Image (cartoon, rainbow, N blue to C red):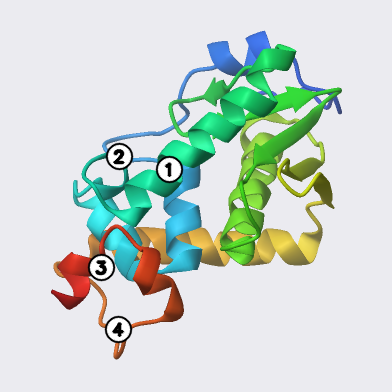
Amino acid sequence: MMMTARPRNKSSAMDDRELAASAPLLEGSQRGVTGTEIHYYVLCPRKLWWFSHGMEQEHVGQHVGAENVALGQLLHEDSYQRAGHKDVMIDNLLRLDFTEDGVVHEIKKSKGGQRATLFQLLYYLYYLKHEKGIETTGMIDYPKQRRREEVTLTPELEVEVERALAGVRSTRALPTPPVVEKPMPICKKCSYQELCWG
């Protein structure tokens, strides 16, 4: 993806107003990658393909995926918005659950999809570093378990994020969903199960 150069502020802490007001840095018609797309790619490239082609199943219907999203939103509101924390939208690509003392927080109801959650947060840190000049750390919050996991973007993890970004772009460009030989354990709770396995 081609990005325009932008002067970098080497601040280690974030100002929410500065992030929310920033403009997209994309050139041409190429669409940027969202945090949700990174999450779906790491979880299941086929789920990413359905989502990126307009099939947003998790927010509609009477299936487990929709129920899980609704529970996650309720948990987020109950645990954090009451305390004054607000979502932060950056460049219409990243929706940070909240920031506190310069740390990016991602809220999850359980440890299911842990690797996908990790990569979503790593992508946020990567984007902030490379597109906004902000180097910071992250925290995955599991309020139901009263646990937190600190996340730091290392040079090795940056390479992994770049691979995931390339994977997202190539998956979105496919004319049909990627082939999956057999259902995975996560398929049972996936909102796209019917599209994949009928």
Q: Cβ–Cβ below 8 Å for labels 1 and 2? A: yes
Q: Residue type at mark 3: give it.
A: Gln
- The residue that mark 2 highlights is 59
Relative to 86, say whether 97 is above or below. below
Q: Earlier in the sequence, mark 1 or mark 2?
A: 2
- C-alpha separation, residue under disc 1 versus residue under disc 3: 15 Å
Q: Earlier in the sequence, mark 3 or mark 4?
A: 4
Corner quadrant of residue 16: top right
- Residue 116: image location, x then y, percent: 57, 60
Q: Earlier in the sequence, mark 1 or mark 4?
A: 1
| Any part of residue 47 in sight | yes
Relative to 51, say whether 192 is above or below. below
- C-alpha separation, residue under disc 1 versus residue under disc 4: 24 Å
Q: Earlier in the sequence, mark 1 or mark 3?
A: 1
Give whichever of 85, 13 is nearer the camera.
85
- Residue 140: image location, x then y, percent: 73, 46
- Residue 117: image location, x then y, percent: 61, 55
- The residue that mark 4 highlights is 180
Q: Which mark is residue 198?
A: none
- The residue that mark 3 highlights is 193
Q: Residue type at mark 2: give it.
A: His
Kindly state the secondary structure of the residue where label 1 is placed: helix
| Any part of residue 6 in sight | no
Report whether 145 appears left or right of 3: right
Instruction: Tell me what residue is drawn at x 43 percent, y 43 percent.
Output: 69
- C-alpha separation, residue under disc 1 versus residue under disc 2: 7 Å
Give whichever of 133, 89 is nearer the camera.
89
- The residue that mark 1 highlights is 69
Q: Earlier in the sequence, mark 4 or mark 2?
A: 2
